[in-house]
Amino acid sequence: MTSKPSVLFVCVHNAGRSQMAAGYLQHLAGDRVTVLSAGSEPGNQVNPVAVQAMAEEGIDISRAVPKILTTGAVRESDVVITMGCGDTCPYFPGKRYEDWVLDDPAGQDIDMVRGVRDDIKNRVQALIRSLDA
């Protein structure tokens, strides 16, 4: 039996995109996947508009706390998904990397954040299919 895959979502502040993606993956894949998220420059709190947008989907990310990205987290992960952190994201050979180009929801209204949320949901569903394959 193989161990369950681990996925690390990384964005700059770990306050919006990466938290929404982690919330979706945890919700949709359950305990089949280990879910991590972090930021190269973590914010003080998760974006309240992102929390609101995810709550509309029945997913509570209100207790999530932005965390600093560590090389250990990258080393432990099978899949690393970056979202706009550019050169600040560490790279380790042998890892599966994806860069998801998503608008930053920081300071945006709920309608804009819903669009980012829905994009993330579609990408997470595709990710789950690829992990299950």
Image: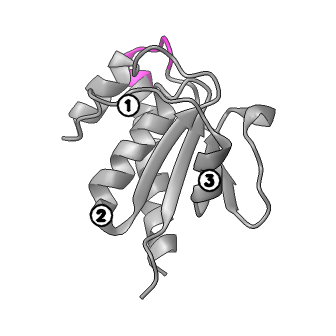
Q: Which residue is mark 3?
A: 80
Q: Secondary structure at mark 1?
A: helix
Side of 65 relative to 79 (left or right):
left
- Nearest to N terminus: mark 2 or mark 1: 2
- Position of residue 124 measured from the top left corner of the image (x, y, whole percent): 45, 55
Residue range in magenta is 106-112
Q: How many marks?
A: 3
Position of residue 77 relative to residue 107, above or below, is below
Q: Which residue is mark 2?
A: 31
Q: Identify the image quadrant of residue 82.
A: top right
- Rendered position, 46 above or below 89: above
Q: Which residue is mark 1?
A: 114
* In-image side of 70 versus 9 (left or right): right
Q: Between residues 80 and 92, which one lies in front from this camera angle?
A: 92
Mark 1 or 3, closer to the camera:
3
In the depicted structure, whether residue 81 falls above or below residue 33: above
* Position of residue 114 measured from the top left corner of the image (x, y, whole percent): 38, 31
Say whether residue 126 is left or right of residue 81.
Answer: left
Q: Distance from label 2 to label 1 (Cα)?
A: 26 Å
The answer for how far apart the CA atoms under marks 1 and 3 are is: 23 Å
